[in-house]
Image: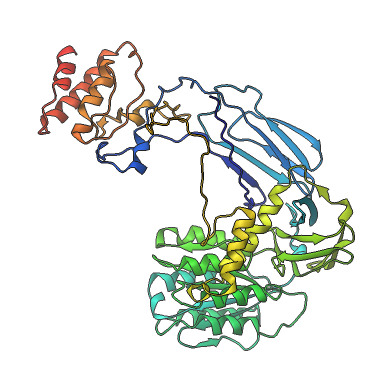
Amino acid sequence: DEIKVELVYSELLVPDRGVYEFVYPTVVGPRYSTADAASAPESERWVQNPYLRAGEPPSTRFDFTASISGGMPLGRVTSPSHDMKVQFPAANRALLTLPDAGTAGADRDMVIRYQLSDKRIETGLMLYEAEGERFFLCMVEPPRRFTPAAVPPREYVFIMDVSGSMHGFPLETSKAVLRNLLGRLRPSDSFNVLFFSGGSYLLSQASLPVTESNTTWALREIERQHGGGGTELLPALQKSFDLPRARRDVARTIVIATDGYVNVEREAFELVRNRLGDASVFAFGIGSSVNRHLIEGLARAGEGLPFVVLGPGEALRAATRFLEYIESPLLTRVEVKTPGFQAYDLEPGQLPDLFAERPLVLTGKYRGDPGGEIVINGFTGEGPFERRIEVNRGKVVPRGEVLRYLWARERLSSLSDFAGPRDLDTGLKQEITKLGLEYGLLTQFTSFVAVDQVVRRRDGKVTTVKQPLPLPQGVSELAVGGVVGGVARKMSVASESSMLTGAEPRMDAARGSGQQTPAARPAPPPRPKALAATVRILENQARGTSVASAAVKEAVRRA
């Protein structure tokens, strides 16, 4: 029989410093295990899989083709892992193929990276129609390079958790982040600090201009905080949104530094999502056991990335990356209108500011023919911005079913963040369930069930065949049962000696190793000095164990 396995999934790639990356795993590297093979759980027995010798080609064939369809012109397209042939059928499309399809290339992950090509804010539109529904995806992409003049005036509101649970390392890290942020501000910027625990208070009733005296005052107040009291996050978040705005074209950014020990996650997510057009919200979680549901949920509601610091050792690196991520808003007060275009069920309902590190993605459905316009307005550092996209000129994606799943996943994520135990008997549960069933998605109320209609073996007995895997590129055979740096790994003595003598390798379950060994192959001619050194290590190991191994003694005698 010929068995064909096809996996289909959708993924929204998030750029890192303007570079999009797609990773396709090809092989699982060897795993070290001391578990008894006979008693190991079924889910963990895969680690005993045999591996081919280093450099030995597998019996399987590996081929790879990738098609990139962008809503706007593509820039550089590369693969750091493989020598791929790249063709551009159109300015917004790329086709990548593996010239030497065969056994090579299956021993390492396939990595594809690409950039979008432009020096200004660019927009793109993709359309797809299937099963009686019409979907679209609109992107606003930041330029790869920009001048300081392109950044509008910035206002930072720092919400600082000074509750009792933040005492010590979390609060000191929060102070360091704020000190660094204040040091990066420009004269045209403004800032404010809101301290909260059981209550909250503002540094100033209106945001302050960046002056030496204001910065010194803020730093002095920050250093006075020691941590104590409750954690009233929601009123503090509401107060920061309600601060008066000095100018309409100012890019307001709210930064929340907290361990997240609250139970108002749903209310916080809803507030951020409903006020997305008023301010960008970024969450910075600090602590050894952060409430990730809150931090990651705030990031999703704010259309950003979550940042978490677990300990002092990673604080500086994470804080630096966080400040890079939030320091360059390029388009603020973003508004979207669709004259003549019957769009509905938009995700997100409002667009946040466009940052140099974060493109904007709007997905939704539409009725009727693709006509009318999508109009995007906002403010840049150089003045008002408007971009009109004619819908009938949007790119109809050949295999655009991914737009269908992306929309459904965004809607599902939005609904799931608001679904708590109190909502299980409400219409929200039914809506999530319907979405999962209609679009084939895994949800908290739906699951996947595979049913095979053809009975191949009526006796019910299954034969398991262990297919040797190729070693990952650059990985030595020592990873599956050798000696590293002159020190023998913990492994089955019989398995080790069989590797040295070229005997049939096997798993020595009786001695409780579970260590995997290479597939059986004739051993190469031994190098006497290296073999003698290895045998001496094994001999010493055998003397120090209570298990008598005839195999080791035989290996020593032969050497």
**In the displayed structure, would residue 415 be above or below residue 544?**
below
Residue 103 position by quadrant: top right
Looking at the image, which residue sits at the far top?
525
In the picture, the quarter occupied by the C terminus is top left
Location of residue 533 in the rendering, given as x and y in whole percent from the top left corner: 23, 21
What residue is drawn where x is 68% and y is 72%?
276
Q: Is residue 213 visible?
A: no
Along the horizontal axis of the image, is 422 left or right of 164?
right
Q: How many marks?
A: 0
The one nearer the camera, 323 or 399, is 399
The one nearer the camera, 206 or 335, is 335
Along the horizontal axis of the image, is 362 left or right of 290?
right
Residue 486 position by quadrant: top left
What residue is drawn where x is 66% and y is 76%?
274
What residue is drawn where x is 35% and y is 24%?
518
Location of residue 278 in the rendering, given as x and y in whole percent from the top left corner: 70, 76
Location of residue 348 in the rendering, given as x and y in whole percent from the top left corner: 69, 66
Location of residue 459 in the rendering, given as x and y in whole percent from the top left corner: 38, 31
The one nearer the camera, 369 or 31, is 369
Along the horizontal axis of the image, is 381 left or right of 195?
right
What residue is drawn where x is 48% and y is 63%?
308
The one nearer the camera, 501 or 526, is 501
